[in-house]
């Protein structure tokens, strides 16, 4: 008996050392493809998110400094506001990381109702910019605004995960899925369309499709939803003259040819990417941000990245973002919790589709829709709630780490 005690005491420091050792990247050999351990998945989400966030702060300052100087505003003072938002986002993300997944699941309905109510406040208190009514002014902040749809994205992913992973719901029963998943989905998308923001509504479509996909509904249902979605998309475009103009501008043979006398926003974006070449003009050396390219700090931030850091820099940013998405889907694929699988899958599809639309807009593959690049584009609400969503994902990853180690306390 003493001998066994001595052996266990010798193993304890070694086990503790393994707990705090940085993981080596070792891929499994399952039939479903490469698999990460729970600890590696945690880092595959955390590290890329931190890198993108820091890089986004730098690019936001680069893209807005010229405009601030032209308006007589101290660019460093303006950047302090952005830095403050980033610190708040970091705190929220850290707090979300240590909230148990069971809490997110238990309170998902109330979170969704709160986010939906905040979104509907656009009706009496909405602030319009660029034809969309997406913002609510925060009282007592001197005109600062918040975009509630960013909060609603996370809330929608959580509530859909709650209902689609519930034991009471048969995902093969289309009537039950239509009621339990359809009602919150349609409510969220209708609330977003109150502000006439079709670009954001498309992201909600991606969240819903991602949740249904991860829940394991029959594949043919997604086909039916695709047909209905195309019909709804055509209808929403047809009732808005500005959307019709954007679509016509995008269609080959109907849009405005590239012109140096009257260039479009897409022209400026492509010129920025082209002038960056292979290695770019250098950090801060963008020319297009000098009031040529509209929304250079938000919707067209990728154009400024290409101009200042070139093709190589752009590919590095996309690779880092790809690592983040890979980590999220590894979390969704390997977790033992149905709620975590659906929620993380929905968030992963949301971030991936939003980035694809943003980059596609810059390079002219999709019409100018107007959605930010996650964690990189300048924007308080987007950065705040995307960082919180990353914290939720890290909370899920911590749960899987606890399960893998045999500790169920995280539940």
Image (tube, rainbow, N blue to C red):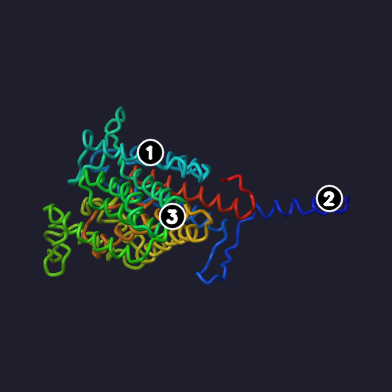
| Residue 290 image offset from top left, x and y in percent | 24, 51
| Residue 164 image offset from top left, x and y in percent | 41, 52
Question: Where is residue 114, by image quadrant?
Answer: top left
- Which of the labelled discs sits on residue 342, or is there none? 3
Q: Residue furthest right?
A: 2
Local packing at callout 1 (Cα closer than 10 Å; few below 14, some 14-19, many 20+) is few
Q: Could you give the CA–CA distance between mark 3 and mark 1, rounded to whole angstroms? A: 37 Å
**Horizontal placement of 310 versus 133: left or right?**
right
In the rendered image, the vertical position of residue 323 relative to residue 149, given as above or below: below
Examine the rendering and report whether any part of residue 303 can be seen. Answer: no
Local packing at callout 3 (Cα closer than 10 Å; few below 14, some 14-19, many 20+) is many
Secondary element at image label 3: helix
- First in sequence: mark 3 vs mark 1: 1
Question: Can you tell which of label 2 and label 3 is closer to the viewer?
Answer: 3
- First in sequence: mark 2 vs mark 3: 2
| Residue 32 image offset from top left, x and y in percent | 50, 69
Question: Can you tell which of label 3 and label 1 is closer to the viewer?
Answer: 3
Q: Could you give the CA–CA distance between mark 1 and mark 2, rounded to whole angstroms? A: 57 Å
Tag 1 near tag 2, CB within 8 Å: no
Q: Residue furthest top?
A: 140
Which residue carries the number 1 mark? Answer: 80
Secondary element at image label 2: helix
Q: Could you give the CA–CA distance between mark 2 and mark 3, rounded to whole angstroms? A: 44 Å
Tag 3 near tag 1, CB within 8 Å: no
Please state which of residues 325 and 377 is positioned toward the viewer in this rendering: 325
- First in sequence: mark 1 vs mark 2: 2
Secondary element at image label 1: helix
Which residue carries the number 2 mark? Answer: 5
| Residue 319 image offset from top left, x and y in percent | 42, 63
């Amino acid at each position: 008996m003493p001998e066994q005690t001595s052996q266990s005491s010798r193993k304890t420091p070694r086990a503790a050392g393994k707990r705090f050792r940085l993981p080596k990247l070792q891929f499994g050999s399952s039939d479903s493809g490469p698999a990460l351990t729970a600890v590696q998945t945690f880092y595959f989400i955390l590290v890329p998110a931190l890198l993108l966030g820091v890089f986004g702060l730098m690019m936001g300052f680069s893209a807005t400094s010229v405009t601030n100087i032209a308006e007589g505003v101290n660019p460093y003072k303006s950047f302090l506001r952005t830095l403050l938002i980033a610190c708040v986002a970091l705190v929220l993300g850290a707090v979300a990381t240590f909230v148990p997944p069971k809490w997110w699941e238990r309170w998902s309905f109330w979170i969704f109702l709160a986010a939906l109510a905040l979104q509907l406040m656009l009706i009496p208190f909405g602030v319009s910019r660029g034809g969309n009514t997406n913002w609510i002014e925060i009282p007592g902040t001197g005109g600062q605004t918040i975009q509630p749809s960013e909060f609603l994205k996370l809330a929608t992913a959580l509530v859909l995960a709650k209902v689609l992973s519930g034991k009471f719901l048969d995902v093969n029963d289309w009537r039950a899925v239509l009621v339990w998943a359809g009602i919150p989905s349609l409510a969220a998308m209708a609330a977003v369309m109150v502000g006439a923001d079709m670009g954001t509504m498309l992201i909600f479509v991606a969240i819903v499709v991602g949740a249904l996909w991860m829940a394991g509904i029959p594949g043919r249902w997604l086909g039916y939803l695709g047909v209905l979605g195309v019909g709804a998309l055509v209808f929403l475009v047809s009732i808005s003259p500005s959307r019709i103009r954007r679509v016509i501008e995008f269609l080959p043979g109907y849009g405005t040819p590239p012109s140096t006398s009257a260039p479009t926003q897409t022209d400026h974006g492509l010129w920025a990417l082209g002038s960056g070449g292979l290695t770019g003009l250098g950090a801060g050396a963008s020319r297009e941000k000098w009031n040529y390219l509209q929304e250079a700090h938000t919707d067209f931030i990728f154009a400024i990245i290409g101009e200042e850091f070139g093709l190589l820099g752009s590919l590095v940013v996309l690779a880092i973002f790809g690592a983040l998405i890979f980590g999220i889907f590894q979390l969704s694929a390997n977790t033992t919790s149905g709620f975590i699988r659906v929620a993380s899958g929905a968030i992963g599809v949301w971030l991936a589709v939003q980035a694809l639309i943003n980059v596609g807009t810059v390079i002219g593959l999709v019409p100018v829709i107007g959605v930010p690049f996650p964690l990189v584009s300048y924007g308080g609400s987007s950065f705040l709630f995307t960082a919180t969503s990353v914290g939720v994902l890290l909370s899920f990853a911590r749960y899987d780490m606890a399960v893998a180690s045999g500790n169920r306390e995280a539940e």
